[in-house]
């Protein structure tokens, strides 16, 4: 198992290198660079050129990239062009803020998704099945920024019981009200995706011969459910890993509506300001987490299903 | 009731209770939602354009010459700041003498002196100095390319030299804000760290800076201008780029004041008892027309037809009255508007006649590509506003194609000639522009200010405009200068160099508890007189 994990971690290196190259390349295609946006519209070309030289943007692209890569390898992603703050610190704060949302949203979304999916599958054809499936489809298809605005209108503006934006400050208890609306909004998609997959997988497994055999053997309902769940777990785990990765990336739309200073918000800001160091740093860290998550999922799958280990 | 439902019920109640106690309101605290997507830099050189100077510039710092917010019935002008008086030497008009104010203290308790002032000039203009702020200095230098050198004459006097006689110089020196050298040394001599614990001389002291979240300020009891010691105890500034989020934050009581509410929310805000503040300020939302050879707007008749073809009043109605029609670079109430011969009203018949004269007609519409942005500083609501204009113009015989770009792409285009690749073949750029001081008009219309030397993107080259502007900058009598600027504006209007559309009215919305705010006709505002009643 250890060998398996180490091998997978090393496989991540070319992935991260590729990601950094693609990000760097894409940034060169978009017109404008951070200096163009930092300076007021009336900035003269001389001044822009001077500033670009100070930040090293006048060097050939491959040199800019390698300079960045060398520093990144030592764990230093440089400073934001705009705030001057170290990228490491900015990314750490943003990721922490996003985790506040992503963890509860994942717990809520996954547990509701599994519950709805199971209930739908075990009541296949029944009106309950139709209801839960409809809920799942709604979760996947509702535009969640729209859902967020509706929630804000109801709970913040009309009833005035929950804050409309921001993440509050102080103790966790004081921050909880700020979490409720964004967490519910964010949990919608994972809930829908997981519910649909669980339903389909469980239905498929239930129709397999071994389940019939177990029933014929006179095994209790709970024991059968256990066997079905164990067989349905690997694909569901894989999807949950991916969904949690998306949540960590921070939904740009949801974080914008709720003015939440997380990783989606940071990415959005960095894209519009062409803040190359922040953009590179954030995306690379997120990519790394994605790889880690997939690894965790693979390990979990291997533990559940010995066939995968072979 | 099962255990689970009981638990859920209690949890829900707890959440609701916490929510009610969450956004508590402190006495004499004003919470403002800005439109910026991040907090503007706080260390004395604000980024984020005018909004930066409005909130983290002038409240925290003084310049030698400050903006005067006290006469709100006219465009804001200048007032003594850290200099008590200033004048250009009549013998040598390049030499400006500033007498420094005595007894001013920085927020850290140290004195503002001539040496501190020189040190601050070094921060921006001396790239050899130890305190040179390489990352930020250019933001200020951009406005002061005419500054040649600066000298300390004695402990009370500073002398600044311009490269050539330049009468509007005091307007631009408002960009240089003064920070405490002692505080800079105390935080370890790094500007990034100074930005977290800054010290200026202004009416508000910065108490807390949280990147992307908020800036908190407190009253500076010892402010040198006793009339402008803030009435507020605390000021909290929150970046909130999304208009609907700002609106929800105001309506749910999380903030007391929002910049730029969405125009369609204004009637409902008014009926719910919120105050709407509207005031003209030096802002124009135009199409900057290219008169280059490849542009249909090279022909004066086409430019004039464009100006006659749009329904400005209709557009203002669409914006719920948050703007006023524009008929020139300056607003007609502005001292430098001058006496143009032409007034552009909504006259589609005249527009069609002019187009016919220029060789266009129903079978041969004027085809033009206009660069517009999705958002940006002062850009108002570019998409719906331009859609409205497109419809107007179609009826008059224009076939307008929009090239929608983000703000950064537009800035890059605007710094290059209209024929350059960065301008993407556009014949006009819809970029909002200020006329806060006499130098703006020069930068946009003087033939020597064509890119890359200035912001005359439209490449207008008009000897009458050039002559009036050159004379204006050599004239040290303000009335005479306004007359000359008026001459330039009149020519710009008569030649229809731009499509003049609307002036923004700087909308803000605030709760009924906010008192004492009288908006100045300026991009910047005075928050010292504001109170928040319980």
Image: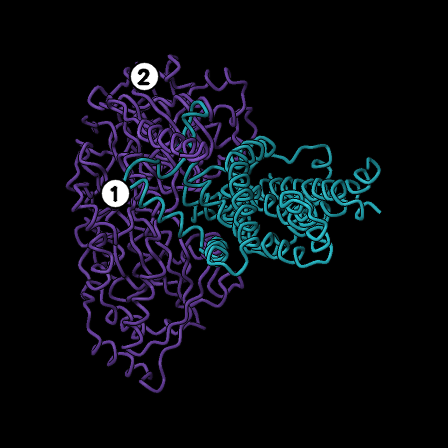
Q: Residues within 10 Å of mark 2 (few under 14, many from 20)?
A: some
Which dot marks residue B104?
A: 2
On the image, the x and y values in percent for residue A133 come to 50, 57
Which numbered tag is attached to residue A218? none
B533 relative to A2, above or below? above
- Circle 2: element type: loop
Q: Position of residue B125 (x, y in %)?
A: 48, 32
- Given residues B328 and A37, the one toward you in this image is A37
Which hue belongs to chain B? purple
Asked which quadrant contains residue B426, the reply is: bottom left
Residue at image position (50%, 65%) is B424
Mark 2 chain: B
Q: Who comes first in sequence, dot 2 or dot 1? A: 2
Instruction: Give the residue number, with chain letter if any, for mark 1.
Output: B508
Left or right: A242 in relation to A5? left
Q: Residues within 10 Å of mark 1 (few under 14, many from 20)?
A: many
> Quadrant of residue B89 in the image?
top left
- Chain A colour is cyan
Q: Is residue A165 visible?
A: yes
Foreground pick, A247 / B449: A247
């Amino acid at each position: 198992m250890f060998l398996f994990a180490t091998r997978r971690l090393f496989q991540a290196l070319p992935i991260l290198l590729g990601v950094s190259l693609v990000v760097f390349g894409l940034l060169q295609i978009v017109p404008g660079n951070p200096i163009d946006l930092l300076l007021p519209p009336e900035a003269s070309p001389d001044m822009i050129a001077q500033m670009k030289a100070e930040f090293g943007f006048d060097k050939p692209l491959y040199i800019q990239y390698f300079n960045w890569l060398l520093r990144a390898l030592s764990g230093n992603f440089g400073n934001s062009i705009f705030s001057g703050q170290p990228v490491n610190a900015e990314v750490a704060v943003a990721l922490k803020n996003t985790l506040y949302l992503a963890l509860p949203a994942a717990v809520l979304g996954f547990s509701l998704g599994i519950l709805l999916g199971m209930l739908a599958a075990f009541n296949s054809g029944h009106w309950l099945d139709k209801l839960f499936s409809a809920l799942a489809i709604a979760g996947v298809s509702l535009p969640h920024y729209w859902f967020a605005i509706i929630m804000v209108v109801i709970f913040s503006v009309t009833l005035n019981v929950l804050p409309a934006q921001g993440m509050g400050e102080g103790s966790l208890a004081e921050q909880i009200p700020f979490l409720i609306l964004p967490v519910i909004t964010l949990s919608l998609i994972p809930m829908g995706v997981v519910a649909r997959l669980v339903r389909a997988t469980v239905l498929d497994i239930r129709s397999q011969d071994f389940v019939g055999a177990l029933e014929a053997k006179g095994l209790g309902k709970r024991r059968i459910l256990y066997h079905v769940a164990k067989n349905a777990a690997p694909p569901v785990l894989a999807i949950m890993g991916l969904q949690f990765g998306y949540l960590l990336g921070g939904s740009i739309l949801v974080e914008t509506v709720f003015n939440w200073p997380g990783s989606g918000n940071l990415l959005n800001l960095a894209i519009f300001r062409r803040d190359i160091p922040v953009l590179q740093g954030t995306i690379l860290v997120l990519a790394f987490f994605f790889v880690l998550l997939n690894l965790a999922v693979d390990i979990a799958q291997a533990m559940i299903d010995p066939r995968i280990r072979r | 009731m099962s255990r689970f439902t009981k638990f859920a019920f209690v949890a829900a109640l707890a959440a609701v209770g916490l929510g009610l106690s969450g956004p508590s309101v402190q006495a004499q605290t004003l919470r403002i939602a800005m439109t910026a997507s991040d907090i503007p830099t706080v260390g004395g050189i604000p980024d984020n354009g005018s909004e930066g100077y409005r909130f983290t510039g002038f409240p925290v710092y003084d310049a030698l010459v400050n903006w005067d917010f006290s006469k709100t019935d006219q465009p804001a002008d200048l007032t003594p700041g850290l200099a008590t008086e200033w004048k250009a030497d009549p013998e040598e008009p390049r030499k400006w003498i500033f007498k420094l104010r005595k007894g001013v203290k920085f927020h850290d308790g140290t004195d503002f002196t001539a040496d501190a002032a020189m040190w601050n000039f070094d921060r921006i203009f001396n790239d050899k100095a130890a305190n040179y702020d390489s990352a930020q200095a250019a933001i200020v230098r951009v406005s002061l390319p005419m500054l040649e050198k600066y000298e300390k004459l004695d402990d009370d006097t500073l002398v600044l030299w311009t490269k050539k006689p330049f009468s509007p110089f005091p307007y631009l020196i408002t960009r240089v804000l003064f920070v405490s050298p002692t505080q800079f040394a105390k935080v370890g001599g790094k500007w990034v760290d100074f930005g977290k614990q800054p010290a200026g001389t202004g009416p508000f002291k910065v108490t807390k800076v949280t990147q992307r979240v908020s800036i908190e300020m407190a009253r500076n009891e010892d402010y040198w201008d006793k009339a402008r010691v803030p009435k507020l105890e605390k000021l909290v500034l929150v970046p909130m780029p999304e208009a609907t989020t700002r609106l929800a934050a105001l309506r749910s009581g999380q903030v007391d004041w929002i910049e730029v509410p969405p125009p369609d929310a204004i009637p409902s805000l008014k009926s719910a008892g919120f105050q709407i503040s509207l005031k003209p300020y030096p802002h124009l939302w135009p199409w900057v027309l290219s008169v280059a050879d490849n542009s249909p707007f090279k022909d004066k008749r086409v430019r004039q037809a464009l100006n006659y073809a749009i329904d400005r009043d209709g557009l203002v109605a669409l914006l719920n009255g948050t703007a006023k029609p524009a008929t020139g670079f300056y607003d007609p109430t502005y001292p430098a508007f001058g006496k143009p011969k032409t007034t552009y009203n909504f006259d589609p018949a005249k527009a069609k006649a002019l187009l016919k004269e220029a060789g266009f007609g129903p079978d041969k519409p004027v085809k033009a590509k206009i660069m517009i942005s999705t958002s940006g500083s002062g850009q108002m609501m570019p998409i719906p506003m331009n859609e409205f204009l497109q419809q107007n113009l179609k009826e008059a015989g224009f076939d307008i194609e929009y090239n929608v770009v983000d703000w950064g792409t537009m800035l890059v285009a605007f710094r290059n000639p209209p024929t350059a690749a960065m301008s993407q073949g556009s014949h006009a750029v819809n970029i909002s522009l200020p006329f806060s001081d006499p130098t703006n008009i020069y930068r946009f219309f003087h033939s020597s200010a064509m890119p890359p030397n200035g912001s005359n993107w439209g490449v207008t080259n008009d000897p009458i405009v050039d002559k009036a502007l050159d004379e204006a900058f050599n004239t040290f009598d303000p009335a005479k200068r306004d007359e000359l600027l008026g001459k330039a504006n009149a020519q710009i209007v008569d030649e229809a160099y731009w499509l003049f559309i609307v002036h923004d009215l700087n909308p803000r919305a605030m709760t009924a508890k906010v008192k004492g705010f009288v908006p100045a006709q300026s991009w910047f505002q005075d928050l010292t007189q504001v109170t928040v009643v319980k």
